[in-house]
Amino acid sequence: MSCLRMGWSNFRFREKPAVGKIRSQRKTKEQEGHRPGEALRVLISHARIRAKVVEMAREIRRDFPDDTLHLIGVLKGSILFLADLARALGGEVSFDFLGVSSYGKGTDSTGEVKLTKDLDVGIEGRTVLIVEDILDTGLTLKYLLKLFEERKPKHLRVAVLLDKVERRITDVKADYTGFAIPNEFVVGYGLDFDERYRNLPDVCVLQLGSRGKTKNE
Ligand code: IMP
């Protein structure tokens, strides 16, 4: 059954099967994807994401207790993370969004980062937090940091939900990181494959074909 046609509540997967039911519940950890040959395996459940986002928000607010935090979301993958983070932050928060392209329709970065939508307002003198879904090669973040530093913000910090540490080919680091993850192609909680799966509440590994090959292989 297509995941889109399953109810929202059925869309969640059990991360930790109860003792005694492991054999039968193993099957529930892998679900069919939207299309034949695509399967999803939960890597990080929505409950874990929720708890981590609250923890990250506390840390960020502790560092900037009195500032208006200007959150800059990198479209489109970061929007669910940004929405949850903003609600957990408290205090004064403003948003802006920008678009970059580094991935086309496939899964491998072209290595080239292009600005497809610039910010609506200037960031000079503001406390800016770049909000990214995932740090992979680091090329996108390196590009954004250079671009924004030239615009003279008061502070410039980076929050990423996921970090594929072993894929990094640049020297950039996030100031606030949710989860370090292995080198697997993930979807859900904003992350897509060809614009699909963004609405999954969990972060899942996308597997292709009967051998469970992932998109990064
Ligand atoms: P980077 O420039 O290589 O660090 O790539 C960052 C961007 O690549 C992210 O904002 C995502 O849009 C995309 N990306 C990297 N890894 C994945 C993945 O596993 N799933 C979905 N998108 C990814």
Image: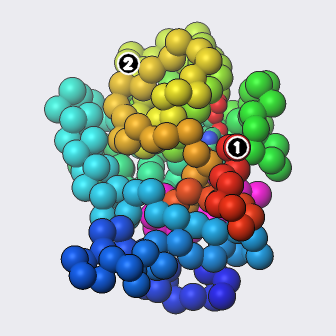
Residue 197 colored magenta? yes
Tell me the quadrant of ligand 1: top right
Q: Position of residue 183 (x, y in %)?
A: 56, 39
Q: Image point 49% across, 40% down: which residue?
A: 182
Q: Is 148 displayed left or right of 158 in the figure? A: right
Q: Which residues are magenta?
A: 189-203
Q: Position of residue 154 (x, y in %)?
A: 39, 16
In this view, 114 is above or below 28: above
Callout 1: CB less than 8 Å from ligand 1: no
Task: Please tell me whether the stretch drawn in magenta is mainly helix, strand or loop.
Answer: loop
Q: Position of residue 189 (x, y in %)?
A: 50, 59
Q: Are marks 1 and 2 in contact (CB under 8 Å)?
A: no
Q: Image point 65% across, 60% down: which residue?
A: 212
Q: Nearer the viewer, mark 1 or mark 2?
A: 1
Residue pointed to by mark 1: 217
Check residue 50 in the rendering and tell me which mark sits there, or answer none.
none
Determine the image quadrant of residue 113: top right
Q: Which image quarter holds the C terminus?
A: top right
Q: What amino acid is at disc 2?
A: His
Query: Distance from label 1 to label 2 (Cα)?
Result: 38 Å
Q: What amino acid is at disc 1?
A: Glu
Q: Secondary structure at mark 2?
A: strand
Residue pointed to by mark 2: 155
Please indicate, yes or no, whether residue 112 appears anywhere in the rendered image.
Answer: yes
In this view, 215 is above or below 5: above
In this view, 203 is above or below 55: below
Is 209 or 57 nearer to us in this picture? 209
Mark with earlier residue (1, 2): 2
Please indicate, yes or no, whether residue 144 appears anywhere in the rendered image.
Answer: no
Residues packed near mark 1 inside 10 Å, few (<14), some (14 to 19) or many (20 plus): few
Q: Image point 47% across, 63% down: which residue?
A: 42
Q: Position of residue 81 (x, y in %)?
A: 44, 52
